[in-house]
Amino acid sequence: MRRFILFLIINTLFIFTNAQDNNCHCKYYNVSEETLEDKLTGIQILNEQVKMPDGELYSQWSSGDVILNNGEKITNRTIRYDGLNDQLTFYNLNKKAQLAVEKGTIKGFDIQLFTTNKMLHFTKLKINNLYSPGYEEHFVQILVAGKVSLYASRKLHNLVSSNQLETSYFYILVKEDGSSTQFQNFSRRYIVNLFPDKENIFRPSLKKQKNRVRTEEQLIKAIELYNSL
């Protein structure tokens, strides 16, 4: 009987110790006083094992601002957009750690590209996911803000066959009445057909500008033109 009780005690200690050694691989970050003052909290994440595609938005850390839900800005932070997981990451120099920001705690962010000195503005938008059913909140880039707004989803997707990432952008157009349209391919005819109420003046105006609406830049100019009509 004593041997049986001793066996139970040893077995219990072994299970308890083994459970402690097999915690999840998540590495939680202890929030520093600086982070608390900034009202930014994050969880430390490991470096990506997948090769990021070329482009500053994904592959380089940049200077930027984070906009909190109350509208306040946290300026000049070292940030990067993680397009694979659709999350904002920032770098803590003191901890030498990369942290993922909880999406629900921020309204958006502005990120500056070094080569062009261009500032990209991102916000949260609830959209219908093209790759899974239902609506989800995503970070999207603001391309045009006005009575008709245009956004771009810059998410990345993993190619299982090659273990590489590819860009697969799509666009979201939001009208004055709140209705929205998502699309990947576009043309002058497609964009004009989205606005049947002003088709008679929108189409000639685009032709006058010689805008065939085949590139993203031309798409932006087309929506800006419509907003001016």
Image: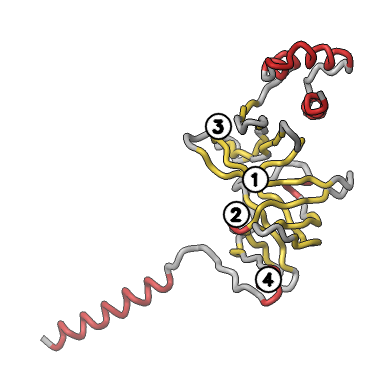
Label 1 – label 3 distance at C-alpha: 14 Å
Label 2 – label 1 distance at C-alpha: 9 Å
> The C terminus is located in which quarter?
top right
Q: According to the image, label 4 marks what residue?
A: 35
Cβ–Cβ under 8 Å for marks 2 and 1? yes
Q: Amino acid at mark 1?
A: Phe
Q: Amino acid at mark 2?
A: Lys
The dot on residue 139 is 1
- Of mark 4 and mark 1, the one earlier in the sequence is 4
Q: Give the structural element (helix, strand or loop) at label 3.
A: loop
Label 4 – label 3 distance at C-alpha: 35 Å
The dot on residue 103 is 2
> The N terminus is located in which quarter?
bottom left
- Of mark 4 and mark 3, the one earlier in the sequence is 4
The dot on residue 3 is none
Q: Amino acid at mark 4?
A: Thr
Give x and y (percent) for residue 209.
89, 18
Question: Within 10 angstroms of label 3, few (less than 14), some, or many (20 or more) residues?
Answer: few
Cβ–Cβ under 8 Å for marks 2 and 4? no
Give x and y (percent) for residue 192.
72, 16
- Of mark 2 and mark 3, the one earlier in the sequence is 2
- Of mark 2 and mark 1, the one earlier in the sequence is 2
Cβ–Cβ under 8 Å for marks 2 and 3? no
The dot on residue 130 is 3
Q: Give the structural element (helix, strand or loop) at label 2.
A: helix
Give x and y (percent) for residue 23.
44, 67
In this picture, is 127 found above or below 222?
below
Q: Quadrant of residue 104?
A: bottom right
Q: Quadrant of residue 77?
A: bottom right
